[in-house]
Image (cartoon, rainbow, N blue to C red):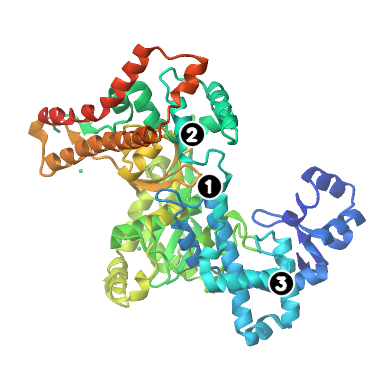
Amino acid sequence: MRIHDKQICLDYSELVPAIMTKDTYDKNKSRGNLQTVGRACYGKEALISFDSLPSKYKAAVVAKYGDPNQYLAKEPIAEQVKLNWDFAAEKYYRTFKLSDTRMLPETYVSKYTEMASWLKTINRFMSDKKALKRSLNITIAEFWENVTALIRSKDIALPTNARSLKNKLADFNQMGYDSLVETWRFGNDNRKKVKDDEAEDRLITMIEDPHMHDNTVIAAFYNQWALETGRETISPATVGYRREQNKNMIMLRQKGAAATYAALSKQIQRKRPSAPLLLVNSDDNILDMFFIAESGKKKNYYYRPALYVVMDAYNDYILGWAIGETVTIDLVKEAYRNAMAHVRELTGNDYMWNQIVTDHWAIDQKKEGALATFFSSQAHFTPATVKVAQSKYIERAFGVTWHQNLKLYPNYSGFNITAKERISTDAIEKAKKNFPSKDKAVDVVAHFITRMRQSINPKSGKTRQNEWLDAFEISPKSSERLLDTEKRFELFGIQHKYTNKITTRGIDVTIDGVKHGYDVPEPLYLENVGKTISVTYDPYDFSQVLVTDGKGLRFIAGAVYKQPSALADFEEGDRTRLNSLLENKKEMMVQISTKLNERLDRMARNGIDAESLLQAGASVPKELAHAANKRISAASEYVDTEESTRSMW
């Protein structure tokens, strides 16, 4: 909501779909039942006059957002939350562990970060009454009334009455970020129906019976025993859950050590015998170069690609760039991705810029759209004042030095400069047959960017790249914001369009026709083998990827090292690496066998015979039971065969 031309107006996104559907909006607009103010265009939403709305929709607006006049008085509080966003909270929740291997799901990282940002802003105003008066010009009572109304209208996961909110703030001040984590959401033993060890052991024993009964049969047999012993009954779905949670141990009992080893043992991948970076600006520029674009038999000699540039305001050093048919949000993201890759190339680390200044292209007023969110997630985002080019250093950078270097190329168009310096039409016409083709544009632009980076700054006598590097080395501020690998993938990574599975080979993923293999860390492998996951990759660095299942599993996977299969190809470290991998394979079987034996010993001590319940319905032949027990006892013996495997190498 905002004031425009002395009218109270709503943004389109505040009206649709929260108040009415798009179809209802379109019909009311066509019938003149509502009035738009100004014009909508790309990156800018339509504004709808509140007074023009039919009565029932006015009432709906008031019900959701409150009285518009009062609502507009509350917005400065929300702006303060945005300006003081708690990036430390985001980092804390991103690394918060629910268990040894489970992380907070992405939705809860965002939820808790938002809650912490609001509580910290409230805390700041409560600690500094002068700031409250100076920034908002309201009383403390008015502040609590406004902030609770904002929390309600914006669906923030905080109490919507002042007393409860104050209690929440007190808890937050005492316990910090942990006070916001709802641990009960992520597993509560009091909700389990199979609670004690005896019940757990009986159920798992039934599941792992060699006859491999389905979940419905297992649930029926278990429930018979549960009713007799005063325990809760379970559903087939519960059986399925336990089956999945204990699948490795169940496989060992049902299929034996050899089959379990073959199915779960992590493959050692090998190769065939024989044969190795405080303020940035960004802007678009229709490149002053001509290229030949062919379409069938027709040729366009005057094709000019759209160039988007990310530039360091320190000395106009080009950090990143991307070209395309036209400027799109994806093109902007690619330029920033390229910039991060170049910083890493120069410094050896993922150092992040502190502030971003751009124009208002595709930036909505509230800075909540896709591009604004992309910028804000990286650093402090402060769009330049509209139509004030001087507020961006990059505008001046597209000037003399830029064109001096462009003129060195035979396909220079001579546009965007004074008429006195413009190349004649005849000269362009004469040279057009020698213009490079469109498919060479990336190479030509890359050459131009390199030339700009190596151009001499007359003020220092150094190339811009060396000047940038020297300053980076001596300034602690330049290296204050070091991105962790996971955050880099979140900001700049590309999520693969297809899901993948964790297999015994690790993770195989094909990107742009090239197959890549990634290793799963040992502590995570056994628990997650067979799981469906999503891969996020960096097109500038395929040495590692971000792996997640969207449910709490999230880790960085490094590229697989392929062991040589020929002894003659072994290099230093290969023998040690191979021994370690073989030892891990052996340890995996020991872990599974140990867990199984511990449970079997416990059952023996307690005199538990869960199999008799199954036999009451369908007896297990003695010879099959004997064979199953024999296979179980063979598990520990099988892993010893690794030693013979070593001798083959």
- Asked if residue 300 lies left or right of residue 447, the reply is right
* Closest to the observer, 384 or 483: 483
Residue 262 locus on image (x, y percent): 29, 25
* Kind of residue at disc 2: Arg
Instruction: List the single residue furthest toward the right.
Output: 55
Q: Nearer the viewer, mark 2 or mark 3?
A: 2
* Side (left or right) of 89 relative to 518: right
Residue 189, disc: 1
Q: Residue at x 10, y 44 (%)?
A: 572
Vertical order, 196 against 50 (above or below): above
Tag 3 residue:
163
**Identity, as a three-letter code, of the amino acid under mark 1:** Asp
Q: Which mark is residue 585?
A: none
The residue wearing badge 2 is: 242
Disc 2 is placed on an element classified as helix
Residue pictured at 39% horizontal, 48% vertical: 555
Question: At x 45% / y 39%, what residue is drawn?
Answer: 197
Q: Position of residue 573 (x, y in %)?
A: 13, 44
Q: Position of residue 162 (x, y in %)?
A: 72, 72
Q: Residue 193: in sight, yes or no?
A: yes
